[in-house]
Image: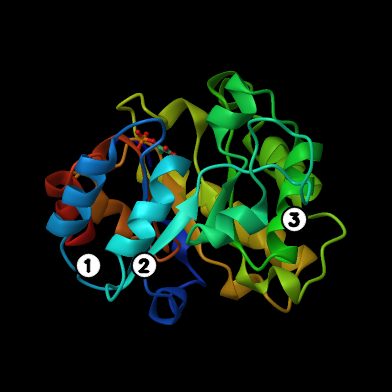
Amino acid sequence: VRGVDIFTYRGEYDKGYEDLREQMEPIFIANWKMNLFEKEALAFVRDLAVPKTGSVIIAPPATLLFPLKQAIKGKSLALCGQNFFFEEKGAYTGELSASQLKDSGASYALIGHSERRHYFNESDAWIHQKLKSALAHHLIPILCVGETLDEKEEGKEEEVLSKQLHTALEGSDEKALSSLVIAYEPVWAIGTGLAADLFLIERGHAFIRKWLEKHYPAIATKIPILYGGSVNEKNAASFLSLQEVAGLLVGGASLAAPPFNAIIRS
Ligand code: PEP
């Protein structure tokens, strides 16, 4: 399957999920990471196009949540926190809580992004606590999962995904999880310019969907699974053509309106 024209490939893993796309409007997330200042953020919102279909969520640095909360008034845009600490409040210098994120205008929160896992040593157990805190404060969790290059080369993708999902979601009430969004982000594809091919994306997404069906049958088909990893204006349409890809989590190509507009219009 590998090596086929990615713009025409429709693979075996899509079978059985044909009607999922009709149920889910795509979600586009701009993850700015530690980039942009107020002036650039406001210009981005001013220049942002309306997606062809679906919704747009901006995940700015925490310092920009409040100004963006004002700037997006009257627009159909939502905000997402890149990070928070799971405790309610207290002596945690430098941290902010889920309820503070909500107060600053966020309705979503990224949880388990590979950069947090790897640069800041966030464990699965920690991610589990964050997920619980997000749900308790009605912040919609965007749980990021994905294997590293080493794990991929050892053929451990499913083992890794399964462990990450298990630990993060364990013990959570099925009903509470119905707002959950999952992003499949192979670590080796993030910020490298090496996006996963359609075969690997379908396989990863299908595995996650099957895992959800097994553990949370009542809500499994309602949970959007996004793809993230070197998405750009050239490859976005091919990813969106997969039934199982319910949207895109975009890093580098979301730092300016023109490339991001091309993605949300594709
Ligand atoms: C990300 O931030 O999750 C991401 C996928 O980044 P990039 O698009 O730059 O690979």
Q: How busy is the neighbourhood of tag 2: few (under 14 within 10 Å), some, or many (20 plus)?
A: many
Q: Quarter of the image containing the N terminus?
A: top left
Q: Nearer the viewer, residue 66 or 187?
A: 66
Q: Amino acid at mark 3?
A: Ser
Q: Amino acid at mark 2?
A: Pro
Q: How busy is the neighbourhood of tag 3: few (under 14 within 10 Å), some, or many (20 plus)?
A: many
Q: How busy is the neighbourhood of tag 1: few (under 14 within 10 Å), some, or many (20 plus)?
A: some
Q: Quadrant of ligand 1?
A: top left
Look at the picture and state if 117 lies above or below 101: above
Question: Left or right: 94 with respect to 80?
Answer: right
What number is the disc on residue 26?
2
Q: Marks 3 and 1: in contact by CB < 8 Å?
A: no
Q: Residue drawn 72% across and 37% down?
A: 159
- In this orientation, does residue 5 appear? no
Question: Disc 2 or 1, which lies upstream in sequence?
Answer: 2
Tell me residue 59's x, y (percent): 42, 49
Q: Marks 1 and 2: in contact by CB < 8 Å?
A: yes
Question: Disc 2 or 3, which lies upstream in sequence?
Answer: 2
- Please tell me whether mark 1 sits on a helix, a strand or a loop: loop
> Residue at label 1?
51
Question: Left or right: 9 with respect to 206?
Answer: left
Q: Amino acid at mark 1?
A: Pro
Tell me residue 206's x, y (percent): 56, 56
Mark 1, mark 3: which one is toward the viewer? 3
Question: Disc 1 or 3, which lies upstream in sequence?
Answer: 1
> Residue at label 3?
133
Q: CA distance from mark 1 to mark 3?
A: 31 Å
Mark 2, mark 1: which one is toward the viewer? 1
- In this orientation, does residue 83 appear? yes
